[in-house]
Image (tube, grey):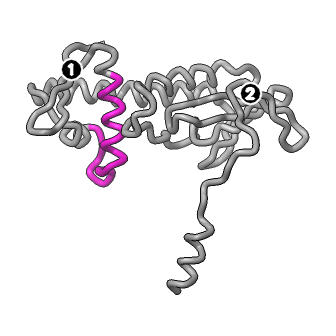
């Protein structure tokens, strides 16, 4: 068994792109022209593909029909991944004549603009929960403490902390929160409401 694992690991490698696709590039797939859309948020380099001739969007992990994608900020690549995610959702919602969206998870869905709005409202609600939690605590709190107000206990962990951090940084960069260090831990306090 260990020999098989060793062989599998030796074959693991990151594929090298044969062509790097940028925002608004046109690529030919399945005899269709697809327009690439850079949609950061879930990952800094996420792309969706849009077929304007047939009204089809490959929404990947950017817009999912029943869940919201993880928006994390621990990689340090984007200053405000939540702001970038909101901007990308707005771009997707503005696409004309979409007949169907094909997500990476879940079933195809038809009202892309409505789903984009629902996802933004979900994150706006999370921002409000952080405002409320900060007011309730009445003091600077760690990302871990605030994560416990944002997520159900079953979801606590590194991904929940990463998403909490992304939301807190969004509030800080919007001048709604301040951050400070206490005993080696990063703390936030929301100082104003939207």
Left or right: 5 in relation to 163? right
- Residue 125 against residue 153 in the figure, above or below: above
- Callout 2: SS: loop
Going 34% across and 29% down the picture, which residue do you hit? 167
Left or right: 193 in relation to 114? left
Indicate the quadrant where residue 108 lies.
top right
Task: Please provide percent x and percent y for residue 42.
Answer: 50, 38
Earlier residue among tags 1 and 2: 2
Q: Residue furthest bottom?
A: 1
Going 41% across and 39% down the picture, which residue do you hit? 75
Q: Is 156 a magenta residue?
A: yes
Please state which of residues 119 and 165 is positioned toward the viewer in this rendering.
165
Indicate the quadrant where residue 177 lies.
top left
Please state which of residues 174 and 114 is positioned toward the viewer in this rendering.
174
- Callout 1: SS: strand
Task: Please provide percent x and percent y for residue 137.
Answer: 11, 30
Task: Please provide percent x and percent y for residue 3.
Answer: 55, 84
Disc tally is: 2
Going 72% across and 24% down the picture, which residue do you hit? 24
The circle on residue 98 is: 2
* Chief secondary structure of the magenta portion: helix
Q: Which residues are magenta?
A: 150-170
Q: Residues within 10 Å of mark 2 (few under 14, many from 20)?
A: many
The circle on residue 178 is: 1
Q: Residues within 10 Å of mark 1 (few under 14, many from 20)?
A: some
Q: Is 160 a magenta residue?
A: yes
The circle on residue 147 is: none
Distance from the alpha carbon under mark 1 to that under mark 2: 41 Å
Going 65% across and 18% down the picture, which residue do you hit? 94
């Amino acid at each position: 068994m260990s020999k098989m694992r060793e062989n599998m690991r030796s074959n693991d490698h990151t594929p090298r792109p044969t062509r790097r696709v940028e925002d608004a590039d046109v690529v030919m797939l399945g005899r269709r022209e697809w327009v690439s859309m850079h949609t950061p948020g879930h990952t800094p380099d996420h792309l969706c593909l849009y077929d304007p001739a047939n009204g089809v969007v490959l929404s990947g992990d950017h817009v999912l029909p029943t869940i919201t994608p993880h928006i994390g900020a621990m990689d340090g690549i984007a200053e405000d991944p939540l702001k970038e995610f909101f901007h990308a959702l707005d771009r997707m919602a503005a696409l004309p004549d979409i007949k169907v969206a094909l997500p990476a998870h879940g079933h195809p869905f038809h009202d892309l603009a409505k789903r984009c709005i629902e996802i933004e409202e979900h994150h706006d609600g999370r921002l409000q929960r952080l405002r409320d939690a900060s007011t309730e605590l009445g003091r600077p709190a760690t990302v871990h403490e605030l994560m416990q107000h944002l997520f159900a206990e079953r979801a606590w962990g590194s991904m929940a902390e990463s998403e909490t951090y992304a939301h807190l940084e969004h509030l800080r960069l919007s001048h709604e929160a301040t951050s400070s260090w206490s005993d080696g831990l990063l703390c936030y306090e929301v100082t104003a409401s939207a």
